[in-house]
Amino acid sequence: MSFNPSSPVTGATVAGLTSPTYTLTTDVAPNINGKQYAITALGGTQTSVDINTVSKPFSISFFRPPVLKSLPQANPVTGVIKNVPYNVYKLITRKGASPAANQSPMMCRMTTTIEVPAGVDTYEPEDLRAMVSLHAGILSAQASGISDTLVSGII
């Protein structure tokens, strides 16, 4: 299955939000190598949180490499593969927010970059799954702590 989130998405537990959900609507990605969704409705209690608008975007995008790279041939004598290329994927969440009263909204961004050496996808796909599982699990489990750090600056 490819990147295809079901809507609504249940948000992770974060201080100040109660049972947050986000309704996704298919949007147009900035390029053909991506999928994008705009947040068009909120659920739970999210006081003062805005949905997607032109002036305050709230969206999530996933991008694959424009050209997928494969594993090059190994040296026929040594069996060593030099210069293994990487396929780089990105998940970007954008949220418009005002920095102060009477100020224009600015863009907040959260980006996860996934760098996969060519060949790992076929030789050890279970390791890719474990990596994503851990990363998503930590983000989910630590969402409240991470958001507190973004607000307080304290790790």
Image: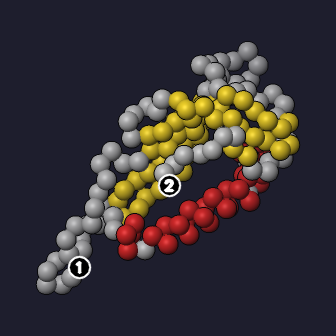
Give percent across and percent down for residue 26: 55, 32
Q: Give the side of residue 2 with respect to residue 104, left or right.
A: left
**Residue at 60% across, 64% down:** 133
Mark sitting earlier along the chain (2/1)? 2
Residue 10 vertical placement versus 79 (above, below)? above
At label 2, the amino acid type is Met
At label 1, the amino acid type is Val
Crowding near pointer 2: few (<14 within 10 Å), some, many (20+)?
A: few
The reply to whether residue 46 is visible in this rendering is yes
Which image quarter: residue 137? bottom right
Residue indicated by mark 1: 80
Residue indicated by mark 2: 1
Q: CA distance from mark 2 to mark 1?
A: 33 Å
Give percent across and percent down for residue 115: 43, 58
**Residue at 69% across, 35% down:** 23
Indicate the secondary structure of the residue bearing disc 1.
Answer: loop
Residue 67 vertical placement versus 137 (above, below)? above
Which image quarter: residue 9? top right
Give percent across and percent down for residue 42: 75, 33
Give percent across and percent down for residue 12: 75, 50
Residue 33: which disc? none
Question: In terms of depth relative to the viewer, which is nearer, 62 or 117?
Answer: 62
Question: In terms of depth relative to the viewer, which is nearer, 35 or 97?
Answer: 35
**Quadrant assignment for the C terminus:** bottom right
Question: In terms of depth relative to the viewer, which is nearer, 16 or 20?
Answer: 20
**Residue at 18% across, 84% down:** 78
**Residue at 54% across, 42% down:** 92
